Amino acid sequence: MGSIQGKKILLTGGTGFIGSPLCQALLERGAKIFVLTHNAHPLLPQITSLSSLTDAAAHAFDIVINLAGETIAQRWTKRAKDRIWRSRVGTTRALVQLMGQTAHKPGVFISASAVGYYGTDATRIFQEDTPTASPTSFAHTLCKAWETEALRAQDLGVRTVLLRLSPVLGRGGGMLEKLWLPFRLGLGGHLGDGKQPLSWIDRDDVLRLIMHIIDTETITGPVNASAPQAISNDTFSRTLASCMGRPCVCHVPGFVLKTVYGQMSEELMLQGQNVFPQKAMGSGFVFSYGSLEASLQKIVARS
């Protein structure tokens, strides 16, 4: 666990839902953290804030972790799609260009992606090498372009890992952010028919998986950041309500979601995919929260 002691790490998205606790975890292992941010969000005093890639070019980084990106959980208007695209694809392209301009190349580049890469399918189990199900979907098109930019770092001799994130469970953001209040009020329930598969991962396991990737030099390419067992949307809703000690008698019809969120609801809320973390588990990673109930009980207890 001491392999990153004293190493310089550049992190984008370092003030976000995953990035903020990741900074703390990396500091605890003795790393020197540099966060690229335009956000006024206060950083820990041990962290160096960089306002531009020009500032970043003055440093030699050992590790680069790219978590930047505008939330995809919004109605996908043309303007929103453009913002989402630029924040992911454009930022990743700029980071790889920065690596190409520096004499000292990082040992590893971990770039976020998402299980939206696989498209939607209720019957298949998606491992890292499984063909996509909906290659024309916006989520797949976005993730494909995002990953293509990240993989250009391989041409520079940089070990590159694509972290395909499932919906992340934790307080203060992620999937639970908009669900917490209605479920707390006893108004929670499944979406659509509730049968759509839902892959998920506890935020603590995301942080541990990133550490595992840094430490395991044989890991390259896509890595599914998903708990081993997907569940249905209905099972998720009932489990969350049970952990909160609340009923689960409501549901949101599909037509309502389509009216409010349009294409986004069809791809990300009313359909789904069953994603299995073959590469993580095959490399020896053990999930602390492989059980949805254990994850949600922990999150509720800490709230």
Image (cartoon, helix red, strand yellow):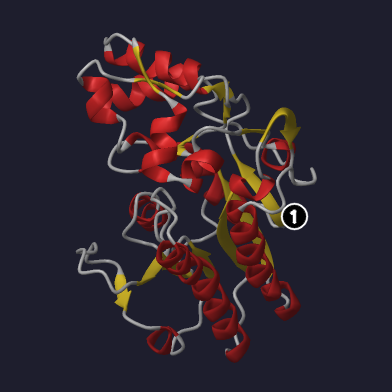
Percent coordinates x, y for residue 80 in the rendering: 41, 62
Percent coordinates x, y for residue 164 in the rendering: 60, 49
Which residue: 21% across, 63% down? 41
- Quadrant of res 267: top right
Which residue: 57% across, 31% down? 227
- The vertical placement of 205 against 291, above or below, is below
Q: Is residue 14 left or right of residue 63?
A: left
In the rendered image, is residue 215 in sight?
no
Q: Is residue 202 left or right of residue 171?
A: right
Which residue: 61% across, 58% down? 143
Q: 208 or 30: which is nearer to us?
A: 208
Total residue callouts:
1
Query: Residue beneath label 1, please?
Result: 218
Q: 185 or 57: which is nearer to us?
A: 185
- The vertical placement of 117 against 251, above or below, is below
Mark 1 burial class by Cα count in 10 Å: few <14, some 14-19, many 20+: few
Percent coordinates x, y for residue 170 in the rendering: 36, 36
Which residue: 61% across, 45% down? 115
Percent coordinates x, y for residue 81 in the rendering: 47, 63
Q: Is residue 97 left or right of residue 132?
A: left
- Quadrant of res 112: bottom right
Q: 223 or 140: which is nearer to us?
A: 140
Secondary structure under the numbered disc 1 in the rendered image: loop
Q: 132 or 168: which is nearer to us?
A: 132
- The vertical placement of 177 against 296, above or below, is below
Q: Amino acid at mark 1?
A: Thr
In the rendered image, is residue 224 in sight?
yes
Pick the quarter of the image with the C terminus. Answer: top left
